[in-house]
Image (spheres, coloured by chain):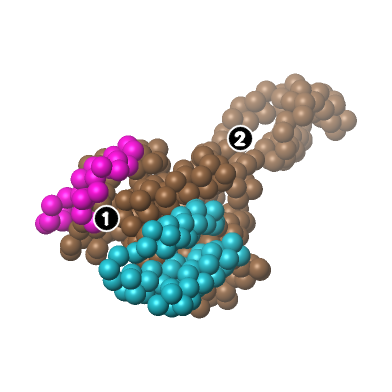
Amino acid sequence: MGLIKNIGNAVKNEVRDYLLKIVEAENEAPKNPEAENVQKPAETKAGQPKVEEKPVVKEEKVQPEKVEEVEKVAEKPRKKEIYPISNDLEFVRVSYKKGQDSVIIPKELAELIKMLPLDEYACFVKLYCFVLEQKKNYGYWGGTLKRRIGLDQLTTSEFEELGSNLAAYGLLLLEQLTENQKTFVLYVPFDEDTMVKLSTAKKPEKKPEKPVKKPAPKPAPKAKAEPEPEEETQRAEDIPGKPVEGMENDEMYKSYKTFVSLEIDKAKMRVGRANFDKIYMEAVKYIDKKYGFKVLSDSDKFKEYLTNYYISAFDIPTFENWKKSKG
Amino acid sequence: MLNDIKILMKSLSDIDVRIMLCKSAFEWELLAKKYNALRDEIEAFCASGLPEDVEKALDKTRAYLVEKRGELPPLDLSDFFK
């Protein structure tokens, strides 16, 4: 009886030690798996020299079940569901009136983000700094952004996971623009003094229900690859990308404007600052020649014609084409 | 009449000088508006038709302005997309 009791105690000790080692090995990289097997018999020998083989046999039977249990325990936190920190946040695309000298997190926002896990918190703060730097709280979501906010060490899937977690927490809005392109809108409390409201972004839950409005008036024609000087008589209403009557409030058109804005930013990065300045100079000369000098001195009209020029120059899809591609 | 046109031309050459010193889009817009107003004034003054040298001077200033506009930093379109 005593012998059996001793064997039982030895097995218990062995299993406990083994499980502790597995847990440690999970946290660190396994250094030498054989070391454990070498150590155990030695320990057993010290306590129970006569029964050294039996505990090993029993240990092998117990091991897989226990390992599974440990793995289950380790996996549980990863599978936990994420609940939004706040449901009533309004996502507004904003641009900052001027560059910020310091990064100030409003108290309201700080209260929200302090509830985030460490990784998501870090990602949010990095995004927030980036948003202040680029003077707008929206942009493309992807590898370039990952690099620009200093998360280059993360893999694409890790970054995507962080993004979707932040979206699940309700502090980021991700929108699938096309198959490969995604945009983000970071939640920032709107401040009239420092920001200009551009448009309100819709939350993804509402997206499938969103009716696709079609503008009643005649759609704008396609953009030309190169602006043609002979079209002197072209009416202002025929400009590609220009909203036709009744279309200004269309949600689709608002999305299109955001898309154009992002495409111009992207083109700016693609061609480089020097080339973009040259393109701008050409645009100014072209607009002056085609539409007259007074357009140049009219800020709103000039911006409109300049956007139109960029749409042509950078092969940005027209509203109609973009709408078709969106399906 | 000669004196009047000389005064107008002096205003035009003032704009030329200011174009060279212009460093922002805002300044440029002010100059462009001044140029437009001056051009209208000169055209109204020479109702029978612009003398050739005056027309040349106006066109030259306009070309300066256009060139300067192209040299200034590209216009920020972000507020246009609201």
Q: Chain of mark 1?
A: A
Decide: few, some or many residues near mark 1? Use Cα within 10 Å; few <14, some 14-19, many ≥20: many
- Residue at (46% x, 57% y) in the render: B60
Q: Chain of mark 2?
A: A
Q: Horizontally, is A36 left or right of B2 in the view?
A: right
Question: For the N terminus of chain A, which image quadrant?
Answer: top right
According to the image, label 2 marks what residue?
Answer: A67
- Where A198 falls versus A138 (above or below)? below
The chain whose colour is brown is A
Query: What x and y, as percent, mark residue A210?
Result: 23, 57
Q: Secondary structure at mark 1?
A: loop
What color is chain B drawn in? cyan
- Check residue A269 for magenta coloring: no
Q: Horizontally, is B9 left or right of A111 in the view?
A: left
- Residue at (72% x, 38% y) in the render: A28
The magenta-colored residue range is A211-236
Q: Horizontally, is B73 left or right of B62 in the view?
A: right
- Where A146 falls versus B67 (above or below)? above
Q: Horizontally, is A147 left or right of A240 in the view?
A: right
> Looking at numbered disc 1 in the image, what kind of residue is underneath it?
Lys
> Looking at numbered disc 2 in the image, what kind of residue is underneath it?
Val
Contact, CB < 8 Å: mark 1 with mark 2? no
Q: Which mark is residue A242?
A: 1
